[in-house]
Structures are given as C-alpha cells and as structure tokens.
Amino acid sequence: MATECVTCTQYEVCTSAHPSIQEMYTKTREMGLDTIFDRYQAQQPQCGFGMTGVCCQLCSHGPCRISEKAPRGICGATADTIVARNMVRLAVHGTAAYSHHLEEVAETIKATARGETPYTIGDPDKLREIASVVGLDTGKETNQLADDLADVILAELRKSSGDPLALVKLFAPPTRLEAWEKLGIIPGGVLSEVRDALTKSMTSINTDPVDLMLTVLRLSLAAGYMGLVGTITIQDILLGTPGITESSADLGILDPATVNIVAHGHVPLMATAVIKAAEDPELNDLAKAAGAEGIKVYGSMCTGQELMQRSGSSAKGFAGQLGNWVTQEYIIATGAVDLVMLDMNCSTPGLKSTADHFHTRLVSVDRVVRMEGVDDHIDFKPEKAEEQARELVKMAVEAYRNRNGVTSIPEHQSGVVSGFSVESILGALGGSLDPLLDAVKKGQIKGIAAVVGCTNNRNGHDTKGLTIMRELIKNDVLVINAGCMSSAAEMQGLMLPGASEQAGEGLQAVCQALGIPPVLNFGSCVDIGRIGVAVTAIAGALGVDPGKLPVVASAPEYLEQKAVVDGVFAVAFGLLTHLGPVPPVLGSPTVTKLLTEDIEGLTGGKVLVEEDPVKAAAKMVEHIDTKRKDLGI
Amino acid sequence: MKEILLDYEKCNGCMACAQACAAEHSESKSIIGAILEGVPSRIFVQSVDGAPFPIICRHCEDAPCVDACMAGAMQKDPGSGVVTNEGHAESCVGCWMCIMACPYGAVARDPRSGTALKCDRCPDRETPACVASCPNHALLYMDTNVYADARRTAEGRRLLAIG
C-alpha cells in the first residue's frame, strides 16, 4: 500500500496517488493511448479569465472578459455580476441532475408498488417512519404506502417555487430554519426553482450579485433536502438502508476468468437488477459456454458505492469497487472489462476513446445519457428492468467472446468496511449515539470531518484528498467519506479497522474499542445527504445548532456542478467548508468576500480556500478546536 | 527603437495573443479563419509548472539563428531590425539549425511548408497583433529606452519605500 505520491519520479505530469492507476497509466502511454492525464497536460496553460470566473459567453456581443483594460462587459456587467451569474448556472446544473436521480427512484418505487419490477420495498420500517413524518396514513399496506410516498416526492419536485419544500421544514434543525427564513432562501418545488434560477441567469434579467448568490444558496437547499436527503431516504426505502458490510476495492479485484460487467455512474437501479440477473443459472451457462468461469458485477464511481453499502442486502454478490472518476479509462485499459453500463452522470467521452482499443462494450442505461460513438442504449424502465438486465448480461457475454485473452490487471487491492449510516452506527452502538458523543466530549475524538465529493487530477489524482484524510485522523478527527473520496480511501486501505494505527492516540483507542476504521464509508456523493442527517442527529442529541459543532466539511478535489451545490449546502448548513481547487470566483471581490467571510454572519458557515492539503487540514483542526472551546468541551 | 517586451507576471494564460497572431498571418485575417486554414501561432504561451509564460522572438541584435542559417534564409533587416526568413523562405533547407541555436525556443517548424517559422513582427501593422490583443498589458511594444526609464522609476520608488 502506497502512502505517498509515487508519480513524480516517473513523469513530469503529476498523476495518481494509487500505484494501480500509475501502473495502468504507464501501460496506456506504452500503448500510445491518450488518457486523462495526457489530455490535462495538453490543456495547459488554462485561461486565467475562465479560472477566475470573469468570462461571460451568454450573448452574441460576447465573449466578454473583465480585465484592467475592460472593467465591464459590453452590456455593463461587472466582474461581480458575471461571477455570481456563472455560479447560479453551475448550481442549477447540479440541482437539476440531482432531481433527475430522485425522480428515477420515485418512479421506480411506484412501479415496484404495482408489482412490475424485480425489486421489493427494502426497508418497510423506514417507509413507515418517513410516511408518518410527512403526514401520510400509515395504516395502509406497504406497497400502497410506498406509492403514496413516491407521489408526495414527485409533487414536491414539481410544485411552485412559492410553496416551501416540506422536506426542508420537516428535516432541518429549527435553528437552521430560522437563519434561512431570515435570508428568504427556503426553496419551493425543485423544478420551479431550477426554472426561476435559469430565468434569473439569462442575459439582462438578474444582474445583482447578492441576489444571484442568495439564489445559489436557495438552490443548494433544494438540492440538499430533495436531491441528497430525499434521494437517500427513498433509495433506502426501495433498496434497503445500508448495513455494515465487508467488500474490496482497486483494480486487483478484477477476475480475468469471468465475464466482467462494470456498473458506472450514480443511479444504482439498473445495476441492482443486473447483479440479480448475473446469478441466473441460464445466463451463467451462457457465460460458461463462452469459456468464462462465471459472471461478475463490479462498481465504479458512486453506483459502485451504492452497491457496496448494500452488498449485504439488495446487492448481494457485488464483486467490489474498481475506482472513481479519474480511474474510469484505466479500468477499461486492463482489457478485462467486457461491458460498462453508463448510468446518469460522470461517464467521460474518454471512456469511448479508450474502449475503442479494446473489446469493451459501452451501453448507456439512462435516457439522458448519450455518448458520441456509443450506439447501444438500454434506457432504464422500471417495469422492464428484469428483461433489460438480462439483455445487458447477454451483451457482456457476447463481448467476452471477443476478448483477445491478454489482460493487464495490477495486483493492488484492499479490503473495505462499508455501509455506515445513522441507522447502522446506532445499531453498532446499541441504539444510542452516546458512546460516540462521549468520545467527542472527552476529546478522544476532537471532531468530525466530512471529506467528500469528487476527485480531480489538478493536484494529482486523490493525492490531496488522501493527504487531508491522513492529517485529520492523525489529529484525532474522525473522517467520514462520501462520493469519489470514498473510493480514494477504499483503495488505500483507510476504511479498514487496522488503519486506526495511522490515527492519533485518542481516535485510535475509540476505533479499537468500537472495531471501526478511522475513515467511515458513508457511500456515494448522494450520501452527503446521509452525512447531513448524521450531523442533524448529533446536533439534536446535544441540543445545539450544527454550526456550533466541532464538525467541518472538505471537498478537496471537487470537480463538477453537483459538487458546487453540495459545497454551498454545507456552508448553508453552518459548516466551515474547505474547497481544494479554487472555485471560479476570484475575479469578483464581492463574491469572494461573501463566500469566505461575510456569509459566516448569515449562515454560520463559510468557504475555506486552501490548495495546500497539509495547511488545509491544520486550518480545519484549528476550527474544530475553536468550536470545542466555544462549547466548553 | 521599439521592441516587443514582456511583463510576464501580468500574463494569465488566456492565449489571446496566440489567436491574434494566427489570425494576422491567415488569409482571412480572422481567428475562426485561422483555425480553419490551420495557421500556427508564432508566439508561445508555455505552461511552466502550471504558470503561463509567454515567449516570442527577441529579434536579437546578434541573432544566433541568423548566424546558424547556412542557407542564408534567416536574415536581420538592417532597417527595421526584424529577424525573419519571410521573403527568403524558399532557400530554407529545413536543417533546423535555427531552432537549435535560438536560446528561447522562439523558432518553430511550419507544418504546412516544412520551413522555419517565427515572429515577423507583423510587417503590415503598426502594433504587432499579439501586443494589440493582450487584455492584460503583459505584452508591450515600445522603445526599449522608454521601457528602461519606467523600470528605473519603478525600482527607485520601491527602494525608497523600503527606506
């Protein structure tokens, strides 16, 4: 297991923290294959106007960019307006994509309630609990109640922007609601909020940087309580709430002797059906007839995290997690992958240019996903999922027949403990958060850091995130992961109880007593909502506002628009939120000051921008210490 | 005498200079036209450890590329001081001695003709296209002595402020 960056001695390009990925990168270079690390280098230097957010391309007068020579765009827009308007456009994208995920799950629940899918309601207790919170008649039988709850979610998605979201009112801590009400940012129906924000950010409609930034906050609450909390809640109801389970990660888990299917993306619905289909004896016979020993379904990105955390229940048989966003092309370059199913989000066009060198078949499985050159589409339909899953397995077997037999699979792999959630932690602690809270009060655990979100090769793939995690646990800060950062920690063995040896004395003792790793796997990026639920539960147990807790958030390698709303959501939630790559706001003094200073007076949270991971961790620990002092613990 | 001078700290890597250079040397004299015609830029914005660094021919008084050119294609115009092979490119044999001799890497190979390609300081323009396009004033076209004078004043001010 590598504990430091191994890249710089090999190439000028700073590449990956993982030896497996570094090994695959060497192989792709030998093959003359351009992959993400090469393309990143080819893009340098990158334009400073875009980097600082002061490039506006909205109208045909443009593009305009703000400089000393031209402090205003042709229409008169200042740097503040352009930066804030660009932020709205980023946030609206993230919010829209999250609501697509939520809608897919809600529609699947409805079809399941009608008995038309291969799924059964996975957590009836949670269904009853949530149904009762939203005021439904819980006397109904499970399927009818699930249908009613899905209707509530769909109605919440579609109602007007003037009608406050029920989930915000029902799930947010009262102190937060007060702060948000004061700012007028409690959102209504998500789709209406998306419409309003897109309208505002059109040319010459809303040019007030402060109102535009309040719109970003409002979108982040819509995304946070519907796209994150809403999605994980109903996904748990459908597929089961995660339970603590063991799995494995990294490219070394690929079995060269089996038909290998990779579930890649964010929405685990089709993948869950495919795992079930892969156990079908008839399809296994087909695989054997093709010369394979069996069929395996692996995970990549967040779909893999969703499967892993439910590998004790609805995703039994899951073969393990291969990697995160940056690793996708290198997974294919092993030559051992027969089919990659692309569900919503994070399938890069680079997948296709890599797959063209191998026998690997790419299939989009979500109606919104299309990729140039990919002609196979099996768009997920809940009532056809069983049949569609079988079709995908058959396609994989067919592709396996075209494998030329040569695979190059790095040997690296690691064990993982997965499936942490409020419910599974409560289960492990005997029904109460007290043992954990006592450790925090006593200072054995100084605080909690959610190190979440994407991966990025701007500063070396996973290098920055892993450095921050290691620094934090060394300082007795318990780390929680969600999203691509989960894969980073999995591949490095940080999610094994034995990793507590790398933690400070206090945290080490707690981990050993409870048998938990110092870095807890909360799952996919949508599971940031699960972290929100956990922080709300801790705040409730201690009777304080989340902003007063010794809790910080970090998105050390944030990449795309969903991560933008995640980060702003954490700030709205009252948390110090570290961002690794500098967001495109530096061109605007107003927006920069708002996010890094002024917003603390409004929501209690603020953005910490620090590119040096060691310094960033030190600043987060300092913040945790201050919060402890303020709480008198 | 005027030269193209660089204030590299002001460069933010937007590459407007490279686009303007290609446009100026294209048939259509436009950025989109230059892309369609495949016209290369003669100014380079190098990424040095992530920081942008603009590089362009210095039109040296004693130009190593001129000395190295055995074909006599690369010449320094005694009037304008411009170092170029424009007008004599047909005698270029493509030995690339000029590329090896230039300490700045400011000479390139023209993929279209297979001859040496470098800044000609835009003979049809009063201010070179790259300088005119720079939104950050990182590129300057001015008399070297005027530049030096401004530098002296700025440095004096800095030292006096330190005390």
Image (spheres, rainbow, N blue to C red):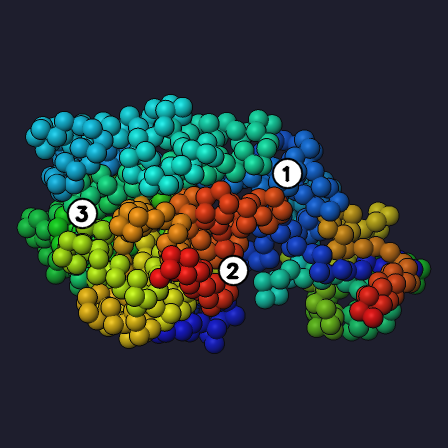
Q: A238 or A603, which is in the foreground?
A: A603
Q: Chain of mark 3?
A: A
Tell me which chain the residue with mark 1 is part of. Answer: A
Label 1 neighbourhood size at 10 Å, few (<14), some (14-19), many (20+)?
Answer: few
Spatial separation of the CA atoms under disc 2 and disc 3? 35 Å
Q: Secondary structure at mark 3?
A: loop
For the residues bearing labels 2 and 3, Cβ distance under 8 angstroms: no
User: Which residue is at the far front?
Assistant: A632
Which element type, helix, strand or loop, lies under badge 1? loop
Horizontally, residue A508 falls left or right of residue A22, namely left
Q: CA distance from mark 3 to mark 1?
A: 48 Å
Q: Name the residue tied to disc 2.
A: A610
Which of the pair B121/A321 is nearer the observer?
A321
Front residue of A632/A620: it is A632
* Nearest to viewer (mark 3 / mark 1): 3
Label 1: which residue? A63
**Spot occupied by residue A499 in the image (x, y as percentages of width and height):** 27, 71
Q: Residue pushed farthest right? A: B79
Q: Is residue A368 at all visible to an observer of this figure?
A: no
Q: Nearer the viewer, residue A24 or B102?
A: A24
Q: Tell me residue B138's x, y (percent).
A: 75, 55
Which SS class for mark 2?
A: loop
Mark 1 vs 2: CB contact within 8 A: no
